[in-house]
Amino acid sequence: MTTSSGLAGVIAGRSAIATVGSEDAGLTYRGYSIADLAANATYEEVAYLLIYNALPTRSQLEAYRSRLAGLRGLPDRLKTVLEQIPSGAHPMDVLRTGASMLGTLEPEGEGGRNPAAVADRLIASFGSMLLYWYRYTKRQERIDVESDEATVAGHFLRLLTGKKPDDLRRRALDVSLILYAEHEFNASTFTARTVTSTLADSYSAVTAAIGALRGPLHGGANEAAMELISQFDSAGAAEKAILHMLETKRLIMGFGHRVYKSGDPRSDIIKSWAKRLSEASGSMTNFNVAERMEQVMRREKNIFPNLDFYAAIAYNQCGIPTSMFTPVFVIARTAGWMAHVMEQRNDNRLIRPLSEYTGPAPRAYVPIDQRK
């Protein structure tokens, strides 16, 4: 047996859902290139692909969008719980609580709820949960979480602002959801599969996955990246600060990836949208700062930005509060999580790795009166 810290390089199972870092294929969802999906598909198509194992026809896509739109509403008892969550809570904790509460109100297995139905319900309602809580605790508004927006991205932006979103921001958010939708055995997905392997319900798996995504070394990197970028008012100031951070060996969030060593294939895609949004708003400072940081990291360390880095700029330009960046990740990744939940169930074995013991050698018990 070999020991691998963080399970680096360990193949922990088989999956037909995505390829990540493949020299031949790159990043694919069920065989489809991420570049093709981001350029041509919508998030609803990708969610359907991941959950139902095929791209939808036009009529299937229309029916799926209608189904998701019909699942946006929240039970009154869930609204009551959301209203009790403090305004200073992190939005990730809101979604973790919301998923768990919904699981008690609409249990899997009751009323014909199968994993796919749970997936659709959570994808449709996570934005409703988050923004109902946000508007209630921040603005004292009890909003109607229904909207006539056809897409998950449009619905989110509509509830966030109370206004119809423009096409550029809607599409930029839609593309980001595609890019975040799935990524093989990452920390949160592996957490979901581990929970599923115990034969727990889907809500438990997703709630646990949200907890794993909460950490800054996984999903929280986009928030940390935005906090860093926003500190600088010029590219020159950013370069000086990044060089000092490198000298003092400080961690710079949004760069590097456990799998991608020569660049995250999603980064350039979201970077192009971050630039378009910045140009459209006439506010290029954050983008220019980010681009200079990218240049410095490449020049000094040959390290590349990951998806989180420029996604932070795109989300900021869409008017999304920084604390909501990772919850948007949750909305997107729910499709991938649930695809893995279903795959794990189809060929299940309890996930139970071993550990290498590094503690004391066997020793005799010492009665309490003889201890020093």
Image: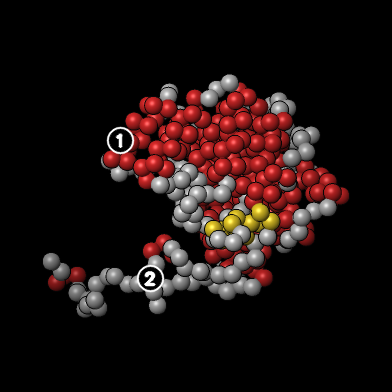
Quickly name the residue at label 1: 244
- Is residue 332 depicted above or below 171 in this figure? below
Q: What type is the residue that disc 2 sits on? A: Thr
Residue visible at 65% across and 37% down?
173
- Of residues 29 and 362, the one nearer the viewer is 29
Q: What type is the residue that disc 1 sits on? A: His
Residue visible at 37% across and 46% down?
301
Left or right: where does residue 342 sit relative to residue 353?
right
Residue 270: image x %, image y %?
A: 59, 40
Regarding mark 1 in the picture, which secondary structure is present there?
Answer: helix
The quarter holding residue 158 reads top right
Q: Which mark is residue 79?
A: none
Q: Which mark is residue 3?
A: 2
Residue 315: image x %, image y %?
A: 58, 34
Left or right: where does residue 45 sit relative to residue 228?
right
- Is residue 57 depicted above or below 143 in this figure? below
How far apart marks 1 and 2 lie (CA) works out to 35 Å
- Looking at marks 1 and 2 on the same chain, the residue that comes earlier in the sequence is marked by 2
Regarding mark 2 in the picture, which secondary structure is present there?
Answer: loop
- Of residues 95 and 68, the one nearer the viewer is 68
